[in-house]
C-alpha cells in the first residue's frame, strides 16, 4: 500500500560494482592477450565532469604482463548511477563472472 515510502533498491550495472557509497570497481580484459586488469576509483578523487554536466571516469589501460594497451570510460548521471560504459582495445568483464 505505501510502496512509495520504502527505500528503492539501486539497480546494479552488470560491469561496474559499487563497493560502498564512494567507491567503484571495474575489471576489463585486453583484446590482444585476454589479460584481466582491475581498477578501483572513487567519487572524490577520480570521477570528473564533462561539458554536459555528466560525471565520467576515463582511464588508459596497460596490462602488467603483456603491456597491452586500451582505454575505457564509465559515465554516470548526477546521482552517480552508471549510464554507459565504453572501451577501446578492452572488453568489460561482467561482475557476476568475477564474484562467482
Image: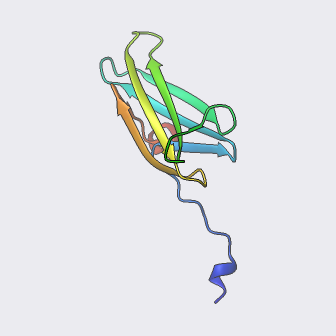
The spot of residue 67 in percent (x, y) is 41, 10
Determine the image quadrant of residue 5: bottom right
Q: Is residue 3 left or right of residue 97?
A: right
Q: Taking 77 as reference, is 34 above or below it? A: above
Residue 69 relative to residue 58: left or right:
left
Q: Measured from the top left, where is residue 25 in percent x and y? A: 57, 36
Judging depth in this view, the residue of 48 and 9 nearest the camera is 48
Q: Is residue 78 above or below residue 41?
A: below
The residue that appears at 61% across and 55% down in the rendered structure is 79
Determine the residue positioned at 43% across, 31% down. 72
Residue displayed at 45% across by 35% down: 73
Pick out the residue farthest to the left: 32
In the image, farthest residue toward the bottom: 1
Number of on-image labels:
0
Quarter location, residue 88: top left
Which quadrant of the figure contains the N terminus?
A: bottom right
- The chosen color scheme is rainbow
Q: Is residue 97 left or right of residue 47?
A: left
Please report the residue visible at 69 percent of the width from the left and 37 percent of the height from the top.
Answer: 44
| Quadrant of residue 24 within the rendered picture | top right
Residue at the farthest front position = 51
Instruction: Name the spot of residue 20 as percent of width and height, x first.
Output: 69, 45
Residue 93: x and y, percent? 42, 36
The one of 1 and 41 positioned closer to us in this rendering: 41
Amino acid at each position: 500500500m505505501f510502496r512509495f515510502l520504502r527505500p528503492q533498491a539501486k539497480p546494479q550495472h552488470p560491469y561496474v560494482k559499487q563497493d560502498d557509497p564512494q567507491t567503484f570497481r571495474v575489471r576489463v580484459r585486453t583484446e590482444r592477450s585476454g589479460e584481466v586488469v582491475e581498477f578501483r576509483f572513487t567519487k572524490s578523487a577520480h570521477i570528473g565532469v564533462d561539458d554536459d554536466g555528466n560525471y565520467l571516469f576515463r582511464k588508459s589501460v596497460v596490462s602488467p604482463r603483456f603491456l597491452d594497451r586500451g582505454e575505457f570510460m564509465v559515465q554516470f548521471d548526477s546521482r552517480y548511477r552508471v549510464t554507459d560504459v565504453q572501451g577501446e582495445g578492452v572488453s568489460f568483464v561482467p561482475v557476476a563472472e568475477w564474484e562467482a
